[in-house]
Image (tube, helix red, strand yellow):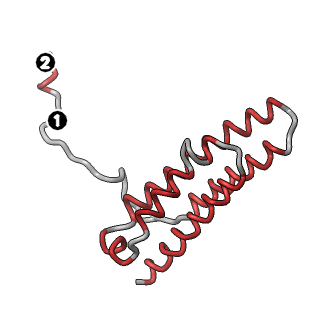
Amino acid sequence: MRIGLIAPTITVSAHCDLPCGVYDPAQAKIEAQSVKACMEKYHGSDDPDFKARAISIKEERSDLVKHHLWVLWTDYFKAPHFEKYPQLNGLFNEATKLAGAGGTKGTTDVAVADNLLAKIAEIDAIFWESKKA
């Protein structure tokens, strides 16, 4: 059988499998709070196995922070938002970097987690203001 006979004849794409329209920066905030808590627990333990587990969870949660921020950045916010809030692209760029390898994913410094939470708080304020419009 030839592969071409069963291949699709048209290609479609969408930003989401099922665009639900439900967005909230709280998802990123909760994951970032978990990152910070893992860092604090890491520093409060002398057990190498516990510390390894804390690092693993912190890195996983850092990825989730980035994921939730990217969804907001790419799916919720549109051109009019970026025009009204010119700092928005910079905030998302800084926040996702703070959740990446050069940020919470690559360190156990609680101050970095605090910086991430502060950026998310700025995004959160803009998000809720944009919902009023």
Identify the residue at image location x=62%, y=47%. 104
- Amino acid type, mark 1: Pro
Q: Residue 133 carries which label?
A: none
Q: Which residue occupies the foreground of this view, 9 or 125?
A: 125
Quarter occupied by residue 29:
bottom right
Task: Read off the residue under disc 1.
Answer: 8
Is 10 left, or right, of 126 in this rendering?
left
Q: Which residue occupies the foreground of this view, 118 or 53?
A: 118
- Amino acid type, mark 2: Arg
- The image position of residue 10, as x and y in percent, is 14, 42
Identify the residue at image location x=63%, y=60%. 115
Identify the residue at image location x=74%, y=47%. 39
Q: Residue 2 carries which label?
A: 2
Q: Earlier in the sequence, mark 2 or mark 1?
A: 2
- The image position of residue 26, as x and y in percent, is 58, 64
Quarter occupied by residue 78:
bottom left
Mark 2 secondary-structure assignment: loop
Q: Distance between the residues labelled 2 and 1?
A: 13 Å
Residue 87, above or below 116: below
- The image position of residue 131, as x and y in percent, is 45, 78
